[in-house]
Image (cartoon, grey):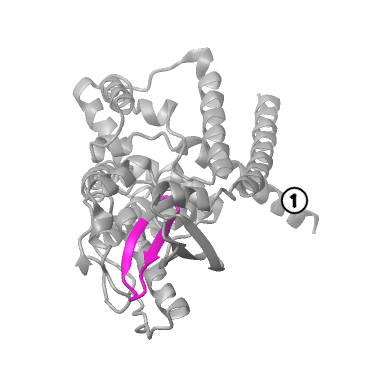
Amino acid sequence: MCKNKTKKKKLETAMAIIAMIIIVIAWFAGRQLENSDILLSIKEKMPEIIKLEEIDNSTYKLYNEEGENFAYLTIESSMGYGGPLQMAVVVDSTGCISNLAVINSKETPSYLEKVLDKKFLDKIIGKTYDEEYSLGKGIDGISSATYSSRAIVEASKKGNRFVAAKVLGLHVPKEIRPSIKFGIPEIALLLLFLVGYIAHKKSFKYTKIARWGTMLAGLFVIGFSFNQPFTLSMINQLLLGYFPPLHSHLYWYLLLGGVFFVFTIDNKNAYCSWFCPFGAAQECMGLVGGAKNRSVGKFKNVFKWALRALTLFAIVTALLLRNPGVTSYEIFGTLFKLTGSSLQFAILGVVLVSSVFIKRPWCNYLCPLGPVTDHFTNIRRLILNKWKSKKIKA
């Protein structure tokens, strides 16, 4: 038995190292493939532009059919929920935004389409370089797509002011630095981490009550109210180095930081076990039919390694395409935002019905976060073993 366990641990460690090597190769390959033809994208989105003349890095003079220079265009980006969102910002000679287009985005397509379908860009067109506006201050965001809305506003404003100052030579007001937003979502998240960390201790007497309390809080607060669960796209975003601004994404940093901090010091998955909203939804369904852990017998390893292969494929594809959310196949948004394809709704229905009889079927057989946390555990064990062996030799 000991020999089998040792072999199993060695296999896990070897596969973890191989996975890391594949991820690193995919990262560098994706970077090489990232340089797409931006000009082609601009011409597709803005067919009225006949000619572009570059006057600075990513800044152009625009000419119409008569050969007249009618405006200037610059490319700016801002961080959305899934990564950088690039905007082509057209500014006329008075410093007013006359046209806009999203030319590259890492956002989930359904959310970005929701923003564009609401004609959100029309709210920004007409804004001038000296106007002080932001999301929630002069411009209302689109419900359930706040991050995409904010990224569009910030990139458009940066492009407008850049052209006004650097090209037109206008006096641009000093930018007001936004303050860090610390509100109910961040407070709720910190409390959930705190309760989960304290209540999982063996000395705590009311573990079961506390766990159901945090799960229900996660379901209604993180899930239905704020809809900001832990997803594979966040891991991909981290690997790609797409770090969003702290002032608008404090929750993002607290969630990722909290998960990995607890893992590092305690080797426990506080999020999935204690307040994952989708896990809580499955357990609530399980109360109806008395769901139990169902054994898959000899297929246990098949399911485990198949899920790991699927997760690795999803991460590698995201790195190659430099798009964190492109392969994030979770159906959380389908439940909490009622947004998704027919296939996603069908999968959601199957998972929820299965949850009545099988305990957490999504978490056990389909969730990509399980293999990610397993991988982190294996790397942590490898580092600790190396450190302990060196300490013993010393």
Which stretch appears magenta? 81-100
Secondary structure, mark 1, is helix
Task: Give the side of residue 226 with respect to residue 108, left or right.
Answer: left
Q: As displayed, is residue 84 above or below residue 308?
A: below
Q: Quadrant of the C terminus?
A: bottom right
Q: Quadrant of the N terminus?
A: top right
Measured as percent of width and height from the top left, residue 253 is found at: 42, 59
Locate residue 199 relative to residue 238 in the image: left or right: left
Q: Is residue 94 visible?
A: yes
**Front one among 127 and 15:** 127
**Dominant SS type (magenta):** strand
**Residue 283 belongs to magenta span:** no
Apparent side of residue 59 relative to residue 164 in the rendered image (left or right): right
Q: Quarter of the image holding residue 343?
A: top left
Q: Residue furthest bottom?
A: 171
Image location (x, y in percent) of residue 318: 53, 41
The foreground one among 336 and 96 is 96
Relative height, residue 273 to residue 180 (above, below) = above
Instruction: Return the x and y of residue 5 as percentages of the image width and height.
Output: 65, 29
Q: Would you say residue 82 sits in the magenta stretch?
A: yes
Q: Does 336 appear above or below 177?
A: above
Q: Residue furthest front?
A: 66
Residue 377's spot in the image, x, y percent?
Answer: 56, 43
In this rendering, is residue 101 above or below 289?
below
Callout 1 crowding tier (Cα within 10 Å): few <14, some 14–19, many ≥20: few
160 with respect to 138 (left or right):
right
